[in-house]
Each structure stands twice: as structure tokens, then as C-alpha cells.
Image: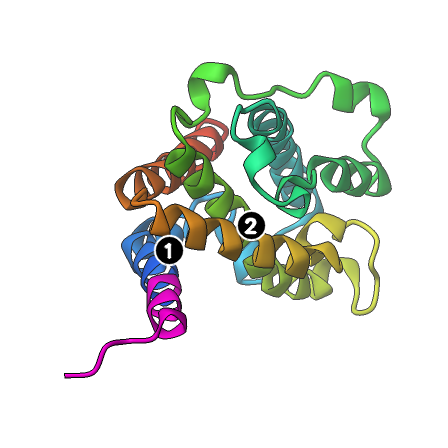
Amino acid sequence: MTLRSEAETSRALRLDGRGRLREATRAAHERLHGQKLLAPLADGSIGLAAYRALLARLYGFHAPLEAFVAASPWAGRVDAALLAPRAPRLRQDLLELGVEAAELARLPRVGSSGLPELGDYGRFVGCLYVRAGSTLGARLLAKALDPLLGAGNVLGRGFLAGGDGADLQWRACCAAIDGATAEGCWDSMLAGADETFAALEAWLDAAS
């Protein structure tokens, strides 16, 4: 019998944590993609009014969520790239699509009771896993906007396109998952991810 090297053990832990988290949340992820407001975006059939409404609803969720995680006592434990705000991209997209600044200020925002419970570090990382993962997945949705916005037109899709920061954010997320897995935070990390998916789905459903 041969003992694993420390490097091999560390790699196994990383793959186990990320892989288990991905598989355990697959159903929630797929259900969200089929959500009434998001489904037309995925299949390229969304109209301009519906797209504006979707972005406005996402803005109402992401802006409070980003403030919430930034104020968490665990925010200092993760790379700053993982906390980089995305709500400003949503705001800019809406402005580019003709929404007035005064209207943006009146958009509904999710209250604290509608956000996931981040009572420990594992839940905090699980929440950020959903957020960072959605940044990567959104790139495909950005391409699906070509019929609406025109191929090559970057205006109005900055949030979905992600930009260069998306890869940095995902790498920072992977590092946080590795650390939380090594600390034995698997159950709470999964709970944080599940609750974040559920919170976003409930917020979107309330506007459907």
C-alpha cells in the first residue's frame, strides 16, 4: 500500500469539494435556467421589454446581496476578486437600454429576509459559489442576445458578458471552496449554495 503525497491529497480534496458542490446543486441550477423570466433569454427569444425587466429584477437582487456579503465578518478571508461587485454592470446595461436613472432608483430590491442565511464561513463560501458560477455561465446567455441586440454589439449585455474579472472571480472562488472543504465546511457550504439558489429563484418568481 502506498501513501498519497500531500500534493495528491490536496488535489483530491479540491476536486471532491468542487465536484460534489456542482453535482449537489445541479438540479437547482437547471431549475433556475428554466425559470419563467430566464428561459426566453436562454433560447434567444427574449424581447427588449422583457430583457429590461429581467435585468431590473436581477439588479434588485444582486445589489443588496453584494452589500450583504461585503459586510460579512468572513469577507476578509477571501480574495477581493471574489467580492468584486457586478450590480454596477447591471445598472449600466439598463441605462444603455434606455432606462432613466430616476427609474433605476425606484426599482424594488430584495429585503434582508429574502437573502440567504450566512451564519458561518461555509455558508458564506456556498453563496459566493453560486454568484461566481453564474458569472461564467452567463457568457453563453450573452451570446444568445445577438438576435435582440445585434451580433458584435456590446451595449446592454455587460453584466452577462462578465469581462476579464469573471475568470479572476472564479479562480478566487475555487480557492475559497478548497479552503472551506479542507476545514470540514462541506455541509454548511452546500446549505449556503442551496439557499442562494432558492433566494434568487423566489425573487424572480415573485415578478413572473
Task: Residue under label 2, please give it.
Answer: 132
Closest to the observer, 61 or 10: 10
Could you tell me which residue is drawn at 35 percent across and 45 percent down? 183
Q: Which numbered disc, 1 or 2, marks the residue that appears first in the sequence? A: 1
Q: Residue furthest bottom?
A: 1
Question: Which label sits in the foreground, 1 or 2?
Answer: 2
Amino acid at pointer 1: Glu
Could you tell me which residue is drawn at 29 percent across and 46 percent down? 186
Closest to the observer, 95 or 11: 11
Q: Is residue 156 left or right of residue 39?
A: right
Do we see residue 33 in this rendering? no
Magenta residues, start to end: 1-14
Q: Is residue 129 left or right of residue 60?
A: left
Task: Residue under label 1, please give it.
Answer: 30
Residue 74 image position (x, y, % from top left): 52, 30
Could you tell me which residue is drawn at 38 percent across and 42 percent down? 193
